[in-house]
Amino acid sequence: MINLTNITKRFGQYPALHGIDLSIRPGEFIALLGPSGSGKTTVLRIMAGLEFQDSGEVRLDGVDVSSLKVADRGVGFVFQHYALFRHMSVADNVAFGLTVRRNKSRGKTRNSRRDIRARADELLRLVQLDGMGRRYPAQLSGGQRQRVALARALAVEPKLLLLDEPFGALDAQVRKDLRRALRDLHQQMGLTSVFVTHDQEEALELADRVVVMNAGRIEQIGTPDEIYAAPATPFVSHFVGETNLLPGSLFGRGHGDLHVRPNEIAIVAGDAPDDRQDSAEVQIVNRFRKGPLWRIEGRLACSDRLIEIDSAPGHVVPAPGDSIWIRPKTARTFPASPDLPANSLNLPCPVSRQGEHA
Amino acid sequence: MNAQIAGATAEGVFTRAFLIALALLFLAVFLALPLVVVFAAALKAGLGPFREAISTPDAVSAIKLTLLVAGISVPLNMVFGVTASWAITKFSFPGKSLLTTLIDLPFSVSPVVSGLIFVLLFGAQGLLGPWLAAHDVKIIFAVPGIVLATMFITFPFVARELIPLMAEQGKDEEEAAISLGANGWQTFWHVTLPNIRWGLLYGVLLCNARAMGEFGAVSVVSGHIRGETNTLPLHVEILYNEYDYVGAFAVASLLAGLALVTLVAKTLLEWRFDLNSSHVTRGAKP
């Protein structure tokens, strides 16, 4: 459906993308996930034709559209800040694409004014805004505005729907509703869609496949499950989900970094020296409720590094000031990478303490 | 809350009264009084001489010339101003900051110098003077020179009004329009222009007021030929120098009247403008 081959892009001196390869199948719902500055929006804008790559190729349905302008690519684009035409009514906003196309062909297309009006009403119904056509964007809430923007993009019957941080400017509850609405809409219409987000929850919830980006490169492409359970790179492991980075040497597991989620850490008794085998001491600094569990924050006794632990249900929750011993139940090991933010903040622990207790 | 903030920053009663009185006194002496004097002096001898003064052939010719100059330079500057603002706010290109600076040049240069620039360029001894003389084109001491000087002086008004406005609005709406299939002209006509219309009108109004009132630059290039190259401000000066005070003030009152009309229109526009933007921001809840 859409294929990007070796796309590169610079903004002045700043290299934004280094060789992006991506294939999207018809009907797929794709999330481009990454921190700000990772190049995800640039990839989306290059797909749309709002930005042009320095080298590489964009193919839509097998046709090279690299040099086509946005108007000729048959894509719908939804902007983060809606970009509604503020002086036009909601219905005129939705009808805009059809109206300008009609005017361009001097009214020779099948679309009469009445057809266009009917189509706009139909789309407003689709995004659950029937009867709002006469209002102006300023009179709508953020969520409603984004629905109008969605209807407006769908009006021109695009082959590909592109959404730039579509929920970025909305508050939590509206975000959730709109997310659901978008997913329903996608299931209903089967329109190939790509959206950009920095919110991993959003990406994992909505997308068929997630493309994780960092510093102008694709780190991993996979289903939400693959991304979460089998991260391919230390960056993905650290960026998706909550992850503690622990020095492997501390637990007798080699010299790499152990990536451990808060729920993968076991609290061991630590009374007997045997318990302390392959474990590390943690000073508790804080605890708070997190849904059904307690989140415990502590510092590794040997390095001051902050560790987040989820208490298992039914156990006594350690209080601030307590000292506990922990051991990773499961973990992913990656070569130690100093680039990850957690690693740059702390001094590493001294080498394995196994010998002390043996 | 507001009262508290005001309380914290407010001066004592005496200081406040003093500052307000000072400001009012200043306004009265330097703005209100001259305006009253102009109209009073113009009508001192009654309506008859007033009407006579503004209907002499020279005065009528000056009025016509002023209208002609404004009629040419204001629309052109409207087009240039929109073009320049569009280029500066919607594109990035090398030399952009230079262009932004150059737009302000007419404001920072003395009008006399602005006039001299054109004399140096197009005058008999100027750079292009001999060529123009050979082809029998008159620019200096003729209407084209006056139009050029006026355009130069009034160029910044529209652009300076539009650049901050268009920069604030960003280019999202234009991108949305082209992504929906609109071409450049449709985008400008249906999306950009409606968004800037009040700011544009405001800029045009100020531009027009200055175009009709400009003295310095026009004085340098006009040559003061009565009935031919005298605009209203120049005509006022001539009458004044000839001790025709009633005539001078009668014609001056026309210009003062224009200033008042501009001021009222500007206030109305600002009010409308404010209403518009607050209307938008008030609705801008997530």
Image (spheres, rainbow, N blue to C red):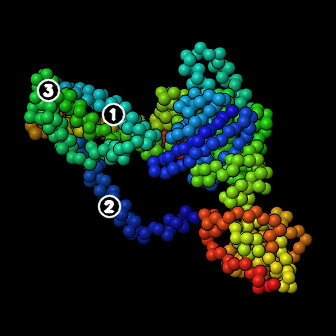
Task: Name the residue at the right extreme.
Answer: A314
Q: In the rendered image, which residue does mark 3 sit on?
A: B132
Is B86 left or right of A184, judged from the image as shown?
left
The quarter of the picture where the C terminus of chain A appears is: bottom right
- The residue closer to the viewer here, A37 or B254, is A37
Name the N-terminal-most of marks 2 and 3.
Answer: 2
- Residue occupying image coordinates x 64% and y 31%: A60
Give the residue type that dot 3 points to.
Leu
* Disc 1: host chain: B
Circles 2 and 3, Cβ within 8 Å, touching? The answer is no
- The amino acid type found where label 1 is placed reads Asn
Q: Which circle's residue, 1 or 3, is located before the other in the chain?
A: 1
Q: Which residue is mark 1?
A: B77
> Which residue matches tag 2?
B22
Distance between mark 1 and mark 3 Cα atoms: 25 Å
Q: Residue drawn 89% across and 73% down?
A: A315
